[in-house]
Image (cartoon, rainbow, N blue to C red):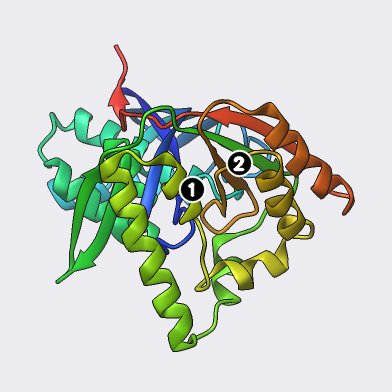
Amino acid sequence: MPRVRVPATTANLGPGFDTLGLALDLYNEVEVELASRAHIEIEGEGRDLLPLDESNMAYRAAVELFRRVEGKSPRFYIRLLNRIPIARGLGSSAAALVGALVGANALLDDPRPLEDLIMLAAELEGHPDNTTPAFIGGLVAVAVIENKVCWRRLPLPQGLHLIAVIPHFRLSTQEARSILPLQVPFKDAVFNLNRLALMLAASWEGDLKLMGQMMEDRLHQPYRLQLIPGAEEAIAAAKEAGALGVALSGSGPTLVALCHVPLPQVGEAMARAFIRQGITASIKILRPSPEGAAILE
């Protein structure tokens, strides 16, 4: 039975909406095995929330891969060990998809190359900015061009730490996307282009300070932050406490602060801002994960 370890991910990093994703050293595990009937077990995050039938996202991903490779839809036993919080903007659904695809591909003796798995995951998830770094690790720039996922892995500055503050409420990607406008002001588009270009340059040059300064956005965060009480205050508190930059993680509600060393006071300051709005939050000090999905011995 293949057992796959998959990292959490944080998408966007401010200006890179649907473009940038970073793998983090917080991992789920997915086990996949052929079975006589559909059977799903979940331990950890989401065990009382996620479906235990064939509608489960990981289960559907395994079935879809077999259908495309062998033209049939067998039954599976799938075990999910979840450490990534559900519906918090840290790529929990991407981890489930990616783990199931890698595990199912291993059951088939790896007939599909990585590029095919990356494309299938993007189709199932709807966007590739979480699933792609979950496959390959590190910081990834990604786009869908002519119905194919095009990606490049980017270097990261030394000493990068991320303080994730995870409010104790769920925010679905669908809800967070529904609030986005159909059009944005021209000056806001230019603002994001400026920041994204300099962020990419900072990653190549290893300039952690500049990278943090460029974690600003006008395309999605001003709208999504309206759904997260205390988030704007938490961002300001993080910067005052020493963070180089702060961004909404994916569609939220988690916030990630970029720091040059582990700074617990940054997470504590953000958590206090949420508490003032009556919202409790967890704090995790994370590092980039250089590895993506991997089959464990």
Residue 43 visible at all: no
Residue 224 position (above or below residue 104): below
- The residue drawn where x is 20% and y is 49% is 152
* Image quadrant occupied by the N terminus: top left
Q: Which is nearer the eye, 178 or 60?
A: 178
Type of the residue with mark 2: Ala
- Total numbered circles: 2
Residue 257 seen in this snapshot = yes
65 with respect to 262 (left or right): left
* SS at badge 1: helix
Q: Categorize mark 2 by other alpha carbons within 10 Å: few (<14), some (14-19), many (20+).
A: many
Disc 1 crowd rating (10 Å Cα; few below 14, some 14-19, many 20+) is many
Q: Position of residue 275 (x, y in %)?
A: 86, 45
Q: Residue 243 carries which label?
A: 2
* Residue lying at 16% horizontally and 33% vertically, measured from the top left: 108
Q: Which mark is residue 212?
A: 1
Q: Quadrant of residue 128?
A: bottom left
Q: Position of residue 271 (x, y in %)?
A: 77, 41
User: Looking at this view, is 144 or 20 the one in front?
Assistant: 20
Q: Nearer the viewer, residue 63 or 4?
A: 4
Marks 2 and 1, how far apart at CA: 8 Å
Q: What residue type is labelled 1?
A: Gly
Q: Quadrant of the C terminus?
A: top left
The image position of residue 92, as x and y in percent, is 50, 43
Task: Specify whether 16 is left or right of 55.
Answer: left
User: Which residue is painted at 45% across and 32% down in the image?
Assistant: 160
Mark before the other along the chain sequence, 2 or 1:
1
Dots 2, 1 in contact, CB < 8 A: yes
Relative to 169, residue 174 above or below: below
- Would you identify the image quadrant in which residue 23 lies? top left
Across and down, in percent, residue 165 comes to: 67, 40
